[in-house]
Image (cartoon, rainbow, N blue to C red):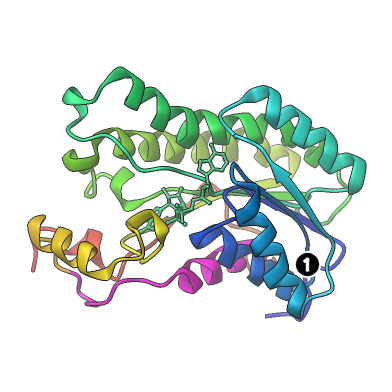
Amino acid sequence: MIENFLEGKVALITGAGSGFGREIAISFANKGANLVLNDINLESIEETRDIILKSSKVDVLLEQADISNEEQVSIMSKNVFNKFDNLFILVNNAGIRGGTSSLKTKTQDYDKVMNVNVKGAWNVTKAFYKKMRKQKFEPVVGKIINMTSCAGTECGLNPFIGIYSVSKAALLAFTKLWALELGPSNITVNAVCPGIFLTPIYDNDESLIREWIKLRQIKLPINKIGESKQVADVVLFLASPAADYITGQNLILDGGMTISINKL
Ligand SMILES: NC(=O)c1ccc[n+]([C@@H]2O[C@H](COP(=O)([O-])OP(=O)(O)OC[C@H]3O[C@@H](n4cnc5c(N)ncnc54)[C@H](O)[C@@H]3O)[C@@H](O)[C@H]2O)c1
């Protein structure tokens, strides 16, 4: 991969205070990107910034905002363009788990998950795409990368976390729609679709994940729980010039989980 291919470019990562978001921010900084770190929790992005500034000399803007709140997202967008002259990469990463069986989920839990996982990504994308479209980079003027989940794919739909599954299926649909809508403006839109990874979303507890895998009779052809760095590497690939002709795709990294259902 070309050294420092993100130099002069700005990347915004939502949910950058933890798990995948933090790892993605670190990997972008290693390639020279200036960063906007968003999270609902300020301390968590201060920590991410401190980790990054130990080894990189990039510019970092912290933006505490709840992505489900349109007004807060609009203020974030103004702050970003007050400080920086571009936003080359937007990673819609922030997401929450929630919901049990879809028909038993309470309305307030439905709203919570859908408001962050679907409306949040929609809010942020709406707030940035117009300026991204006018940027002078070549051949691609900007890139949007959404964090979906195997739980939102046809084989992965999961009745134990029904509304979460629905939210990720919707984000996948948005990925394809935005690729269609923004392709003519030379913006690529793709999704990264993790299987089961050890992050704070699972309380960083491998035994909890193993129990769940057993309960659901999931077989992993590569029998390992994924690590955040593996997700960050795929996001970095999509952010790189090697992926300039890829759009509307959902890159699954799941150790083979989704292809193995009912086959192992
Ligand atoms: N960990 C997995 O196995 C896994 C698998 C598939 C998909 N995902 C998806 O990857 C993404 C990141 O997951 P993670 O495992 O790193 O989770 P995480 O809980 O470690 O990190 C999510 C971050 O998003 C932030 N956040 C939550 N609500 C927010 C809001 N309204 N506004 C702004 N920030 C908010 C949290 O504070 C947290 O820092 C999520 O979208 C998740 O659904 C995770």
Residue 123 is left or right of residue 227, and the answer is: right
Residue 187: give x, y in percent of width and height.
Answer: 70, 45
Highlighted range, magenta: 220-240
Residue 112: give x, y in percent of width and height.
Answer: 41, 28
| Above/below status of 243 relative to 38 | below
Residue 230 magenta: yes
Q: Helix, strand, or loop for circle 1? A: loop
The residue positioned 85% from the left and 48% from the top of the image is: 86
Q: For residue 240, what is the image quadrant? A: bottom right
- Quarter of the image that includes the N terminus: bottom right
Name the residue nearer the viewer: 123 or 191. 123
Residue 28: give x, y in percent of width and height.
Answer: 69, 67
Q: For residue 209, what is the image quadrant? A: bottom left
Name the residue nearer the viewer: 88 or 69. 69
Q: Amino acid at mark 1?
A: Leu
Residue 139 visible within the image:
no
Picture mark count:
1
Q: Which residue is mark 1?
A: 6
Mark 1 Cα-neighbour bin, 10 Å: few <14, some 14–19, many ≥20: many
Name the residue nearer the viewer: 145 or 65. 65
The residue positioned 18% from the left and 42% from the top of the image is: 160
- Quarter of the image that includes the C terminus: bottom left
Residue 225 is left or right of residue 82, and the answer is: left
The furthest residue to the front: 43
Q: For residue 82, what is the image quadrant? A: top right
| Above/below status of 243 relative to 87 | below
Name the residue nearer the viewer: 5 or 215. 215
The residue positioned 56% from the left and 36% from the top of the image is: 121
Residue 234 magenta: yes
Residue 57 is left or right of residue 171, and the answer is: right
The furthest residue to the top: 107
Within 8 Å of ligand 1, the CB of disc 1?
no
